[in-house]
Image (tube, rainbow, N blue to C red):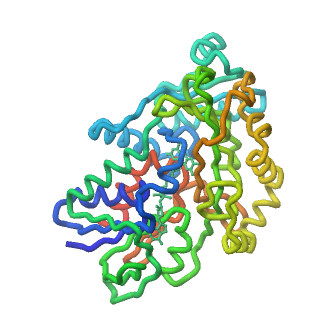
Amino acid sequence: MKRVAIIGGGILGLAIGYKLTSKKNKYKVEILEKENKLGKHQSGNNSGVLHCGLYYEPGSLKAKLAVEGIREMVQFSQNYGVSHDICGKIVVATNNYEEKFLQNLANRGKKNGLKGLKFLSKKELSLREPNVIATKALLVPEEGIIDYNHVVNELSKRINSRDGEIVLACEVLSSKKLNDNQVTLITNKFEKNYDLVISCSGLYSDRVFSKLIHKKSPLQIIPFRGEYMHVKKEYMDIVNHLVYPVPDPKFPFLGIHFTRLINGGREVGPNAVLALKREGYSNKDFSLNDTIEILKYKGLRNFILKNFGFTINEFVSSFSTKAFIKKAKKLIPSSERFMFEKGGTSGVRAQAISKNGELLMDFKIVREDNQIHILNAPSPGATASLSIAKYIISKYITN
Ligand SMILES: Cc1cc2nc3c(=O)[nH]c(=O)nc-3n(C[C@H](O)[C@H](O)[C@H](O)COP(=O)(O)OP(=O)(O)OC[C@H]3O[C@@H](n4cnc5c(N)ncnc54)[C@H](O)[C@@H]3O)c2cc1C
């Protein structure tokens, strides 16, 4: 049996482990996770939305894997009793300028094979979302919500019951090449030889690449924190579905939106704040090391120069509740501060950025000898996790 180490116990590492261990007696899989719990970072702190491929450039890996991924994720959830709800999403334009982009999104969605896309009349919109004010609104009926922590648990149960093992509190520190076919991983717990190493290390994907391949990563990860606010129980009926703005096509972020949660609650968020710590979940979190590293990177300086207004605006929305609510008001003008409470989740996105300051939109996976590194897996990485796993196995492992 081939010995495989998967670095990272987020949804991607687990999806790959789940798929590999389904091939009986072929792979002995170990998931090495530095935390003492699975899904502690991006996979357990996201919007919990099942994206079906509306936004993504037709022909891109993201478009292909999101469309396939949502179908596979829904099937998985039905098989293993994971709570999910295909409640549909409405994307809302609020002026002529946004209407053009909304039309482009609808065209993209059609090209990506989405079904049932429909512009809603004023009456149809007010029946579904009486508090939303829009000049144009697009219904995306295939999208929904899901409990990704439950997905993580179900994946890990299957891995443990097959030829797989999950090792928690196990940080991978570096590697040595043993021979042409094997690599030795050095962790805080042990040193071990493997035939194949797959890194799914999210916010640390670039650092893990450098430590294991012993050269500079082609991309750098910049952490962008996304903060949410809860809608208070008594105001939950201000929104029924998922309600999203038209996103700025320059960014991979979708803009502050209203989300119906799988537990019945409602959230609004996330913003996209440049974080000064890779795993910094609050605006008080700061790491000198991480801050120096990102500020030294030419790509980030170029990004800030090109997008100064965006960077400042998102920072302000982190410190000023008024500025945060202003973004929510764009979708639902009757939103008022007293309807929301702090204490919503927050997540940090691992976003790869190139030297010239472009945020990489698509998934990025590289193979070097017997190592595979997922360098960029932004949203909809959770929705598409099972199809990303299938893609990696067929392209890099079994062909
Ligand atoms: C705010 C936010 C909202 C989002 N909304 C959605 C959404 O609604 N729908 C959607 O589909 N996607 C969404 N995403 C994206 C989605 O969450 C990610 O694409 C997905 O979770 C990536 O999974 P992962 O396993 O690569 O990363 P992670 O879940 O971050 O897992 C990486 C793991 O690697 C571990 N690790 C790192 N370094 C080491 C090391 N040296 N040794 C051992 N372990 C290590 C970490 O501890 C971590 O557990 C969102 C993301 C964020 C942050």
Query: Does residue 51 appear anywhere in the picture?
Result: no
Up-down relation of residue 187 to residue 44 (above or below): below
Residue 345 appears in which quarter of the rendering? top right
Q: Is residue 21 left or right of residue 391?
A: left
How many marks the image carries: the answer is 0
As drawn, 312 above or below 82: below
Question: Is residue 254 shown above or below 213?
Answer: above
The x and y percentages for residue 49 are 50, 39
Q: Quadrant of residue 118?
A: top right
> What x and y, as percent, mark residue 227?
64, 46
Furthest-top residue in this view: 123
Q: Say whether residue 327 is visible.
A: yes
The answer to which image quadrant residue 200 occupies is: bottom left
Q: Quadrant of the C terminus?
A: bottom left
Task: Please state which of residues 122 and 260 is positioned toward the viewer in this rendering.
Answer: 260
Q: Residue at x 34, y 89 (%)?
A: 178
Which corner quadrant holds the N terminus? bottom left
Give the residue at x 73% y 32%. Answer: 98
| Residue in the image at 67% along x and 32% along y | 340
